[in-house]
Image (cartoon, helix red, strand yellow):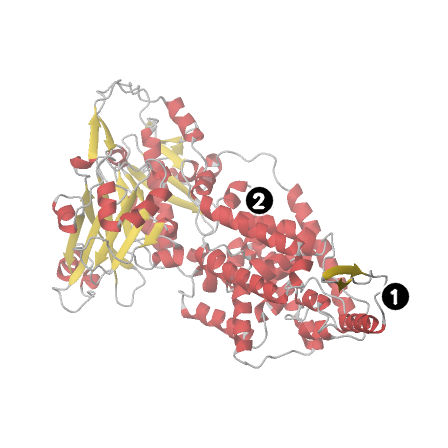
Amino acid sequence: MASHKLSTAIRRITVLWVAAIAFATMSISPAFPASQLPAYLEKVQPGELFEGADRFGTPSGQPPIAPVYRGEEMVGYAYLSSDFTGSTGYSGKPIQIAVGIDTSGVVRGIKLIEHHEPIVLIGIPQAKVVAALNSIIGKNLGRVAAGEERPPQVEIVSGATVTVLVMGDSVIRSAVKLIRSNRLSAGAEPSLKAPPDVKTLDLSRSDVKDWQTLLGDGSVRSLRLSVAEVSKAFGEAGHADAASHPETTNPDDRFIDLYVAPVSVPTIGRTLLGDPAYQRLQSRLQAGQSAILVAGDGAYSFKGSGYVRGGIFDRIELLQDGQGLRFRDRNHTRIATLAASDAPDLREIALFVVPPDFGFDITEPWDLQLLAQRSSSGARDKAVIPYNLEYTLPSQYISVAKAAAPLPPVPTQDDASNQVQDDHPLWIRIWNNSRLNIGTTICALLVLTLIFFFQDWLVKRPKLFAWVRNGYLVFTLVWLGWYANAQLSVVNVLTFMNSLITNFTWEFFLAAPLIFILWAAVAAGLLFWGRGPFCGWLCPFGALQELLSKTAKRLKVPQVKLPWGLHERLWPIKYIIFLGLFGLSFYSMSYAEMAAEVEPFKTAIILKFVRDWPFVVFAVALLAASLFIERFYCRYLCPLGAALAIPGRIRMFEWLKRYPECGSPCQRCAKECPVQSIHPEGQINVNECIYCMHCQELYHDDQRCPHMIQVRLKREKFMALSTPESRGEKPPKTVVTHNGKPIERT
């Protein structure tokens, strides 16, 4: 009776779920405006962007910029940074920042209009984020656009590092792009300049040298700082508290010995990496793409821990031609040791591949900026001092040729606008840079499809199936989860539903290729098998639970089997959690994202347990429970499993086979189901089934399944009591000999 009521309730929820999707789909606006500058300017006072300004003019151009007036005098322009460059943070939604810039390229004001960053809402005061962003005000980005100065740095706010970096990078990049379009200086006459010499990397030089030679001729550049020097710099910059908290007690200790070298240059790469590693690097690089080796030793780590939490190296930045690049974990490869025999023993060695869309030119001067960070006692903020390590590739690695033709005229305003519009979208560049991961994921999905379509053949071979099952779970956990971070989350569902009823755009969802591919596969799998393919095979956290449970069983850890009545009443908890998150997302997506921390996926899979202790304790507690109750979290608490189970009821096929005796009288499958998804009466609850196929192994096993045992015994009895003739078999041939010659008889 309870089971029938639960089934009826789930059917009603399914109807409501489908109705919500239909309503949301009808709510999509047919046309999404290219820019919302006029609407956002209504939330900004002209005086917040320019001192004494009193009105905005009419926005014009594409992307639009609006003139700002003080009386009758035009003092500059206002624009949205998100119109010129990407500004998407953790929330997946654009961070809307209004920027005031005068005609000479000086930023006069910044206004953070709108954001949905949960990391700021959790406890980081927005005032601190705004204060860090305001450090750009007064900076002449015209000199940055001309390559005369390096981009300014925003101060890092501890706990919101990536968010602040995204905001600052958005303002600087958008301003540089606007300045270079010549839209700030109307009527400027284009002029022809003498064509510069054409410099290319000389690939014919590939001789192997030694460390001291490379260091002596400038192929490897270094920056050496002591703890005392850095403390003095903090003191002179007004950070007395940070100056009084050095990394070591001895001021003469080495703060950092930092080395940098472009290893995509053949001689440098072969010397530092060795031939095998250099050849592997070349196979990864596209034509004209560069790679840089950064190595360090001392008390300070140039890597830090930001790349662990947010995937970004926030202590170093590559600078060239007024643009800056902070490397992400996907650009990084750890190097254990340098190949040169006389190279020093360095604590940290990292290989960074420069993304093609950055436009890095190895033959031109560039800088690697080190951000020295120190925390003040009892404070959450960090004081930061930048140190620049300048690099110019030695002329011996460069080929120089005279340009054959003069430069074309400087592009007009319309040309610049068209160029901005013709840039490839960010998601296309991401997909191009993720081809290997995409190919691996698609191959894994094809393998899983074959497993499902040929499941009868596979489960008849239990030992082979066990190897396939366990191997796939290890792949899902290690590669898909810990390496590729392709862990689906209920936040994806909430974000999708929220975007349907606001301003839907595919670009945000396409910006994460593996997540998009997995969701497409899950959507297709729902039609065939329900939620089982994801929950049982493609969820890294689910795989971690199951592998731990298998290990616990091998170690004879006692297993707890809940009574069916209690087990059945715990099922709805995950549906209640999901519906609560779903409803909360319509009120505030930011609050829903914070409440979605009920999922331990981010802690255990994305951040690999490198997180604040309450989150780690929660994740470890759930994993500990799975040692005694297999997939405890999946059974009772997972809101994502509930979200998939609801539409999974519309599946079109029934792949799991049953006998009439299943459930009455036979209870073997029900007792052995790892997640207790089989009712004592024999039917399988596909809402709870993870498609582990254990019941299908039993279905074909004539040594364990009572039905198959009876079939086998009848077959053996028939074979024992019958003759080949009675069974219609051809009698065997006998061979006799006559005078040594064989004669066949039947």
Left or right: residue 144 versus residue 486 is left
- Residue 583 appears anywhere in the view: yes
Mark 1 / mark 2, whichever is N-terminal:
2
Left or right: residue 570 versus residue 297 is right
Amino acid type at image mark 2: Thr
Q: Which residue is mark 2?
A: 502
Q: Measured from the top left, where is residue 96 in percent x and y? A: 43, 43
Q: How many marks?
A: 2
Q: Secondary structure at mark 1?
A: loop
User: Which of these two is toward me, 659 or 243?
Assistant: 659
User: Which of these two is toward me, 519 or 31?
Assistant: 519
Amino acid type at image mark 1: Ser
On the image, which quarter does residue 467 sit in? bottom right
Q: Measured from the top left, where is residue 316 in percent x and y? A: 27, 51
User: Which of these two is toward me, 146 or 252?
Assistant: 252
Looking at the image, which residue is at 37% across and 23% down?
A: 413
Q: Measured from the top left, where is residue 730 in percent x and y? A: 82, 60
Inter-mark Cα distance, 1 to 2: 76 Å
Q: Secondary structure at mark 2?
A: loop
Q: Residues within 10 Å of mark 1 (few under 14, many from 20)?
A: few
Q: Measured from the top left, where is residue 180 in percent x and y? A: 32, 30
Q: Which residue is mark 1?
A: 726
On the image, which quarter does residue 225 sit in? bottom left
Residue 705's mark? none
Left or right: residue 694 versus residue 308 is right
Looking at the image, which residue is at 61% across and 79% down?
A: 560
Left or right: residue 349 versus residue 501 is left
Number of the front mark, 1 or 2: 1
